[in-house]
Amino acid sequence: KQEVTQIPAALSVPEGENLVLNCSFTDSAIYNLQWFRQDPGKGLTSLLLIQSSQREQTSGRLNASLDKSSGRSTLYIAASQPGDSATYLCAVKDSNYQLIWGAGTKLIIKP
Amino acid sequence: DAMVIQNPRYQVTQFGKPVTLSCSQTLNHNVMYWYQQKSSQAPKLLFHYYDKDFNNEADTPDNFQSRRPNTSFCFLDIRSPGLGDAAMYLCATSLSSGVSYEQYFGPGTRLTVT
């Protein structure tokens, strides 16, 4: 059974720092991996989607990498800003085409 | 802009009083999903529709039902809400359920049960 883990559960960093969020999964048989952002009390915004054949995707200050063999993905945020404060969730699409979710990392950027 | 809309954004209901949450989409997607998300937890898939075909997750309680009268609308009915059903309910859509298709989420409905 696929399990997705995000560690740490919470992270606080000063504004301007570069940071990395981690996502690990137990079964490498995935179709893709997606990173989402969730602001408090709000819905989910898709940030980046990496297909299983890809190694990374970039959007602005965000870069997501995927290493299927080791069951890991990272989300790199460059030059962090207070507006980046949110919960970041990763999800993998498994062999049944279902999304399996991590519990998220709550990120706080201190001005 | 094409989007996924959920109404209401906040819903308060009494213990045991039926409640219906609404989702509509202008994306003309074939698949619509309902997720339940409790505080600080990952979203949990309740069920999804592929066109008119209903797919229920094995561990979704019978208390939760869904209707999809047309492509654009999907409803979540909670027949007898309990305190444990208080959560954020997220609707999502995708063009198809295959490998490459992203899910697009609405803003969610936060349900409070008193």
Image (cartoon, helix red, strand yellow):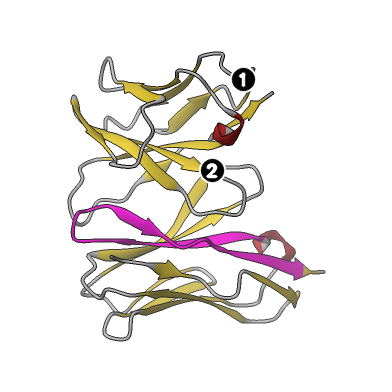
* Chain containing mark 1: B
Q: Amino acid at mark 2?
A: Gly
> Both on one chain, marks 2 and 1?
no
- Label 1 environment density (alpha carbons within 10 Å; few <14, some 14–19, many ≥20): some
How many angstroms separate mark 2 from mark 1 (CA)? 25 Å
Q: Which residue is mark 2?
A: A43
Q: Amino acid at mark 1?
A: Phe
Residue at 40 percent of width and 68 percent of height: A4
- The overriding secondary structure of the stretch rendered in magenta is strand
Image quarter where the C terminus of chain A lies is bottom right
Q: Is residue A93 above or below residue B106?
A: below
Q: Quadrant of residue B85?
A: top right
Q: Give x and y (percent) for residue A44.
A: 50, 48
Q: Which mark is residue B15?
A: 1
Image side of residue B61 versus residue A96, left or right: right
Single out the mark in the foreground, 2 or 1: 1
Residue B107: in sight, yes or no? Answer: no
Residue at 61 percent of width and 80 percent of height: A19
Residue at 35 percent of width and 58 percent of height: A100
Image side of residue A3 versus residue B79, left or right: left
The residue segment tinted magenta is A86-109
Residue A18: in sight, yes or no? Answer: yes
Q: Please state which of residues B71 and A3 is positioned toward the viewer in this rendering.
A: A3
Label 2 secondary element: loop
Q: Give x and y (percent) for residue A103.
A: 52, 61
Q: Please state which of residues A37 and A93 is positioned toward the viewer in this rendering.
A: A93
Check contact, mark 2 vs mark 1: CB within 8 A: no
Q: Which mark is residue A82?
A: none
* Chain containing mark 2: A
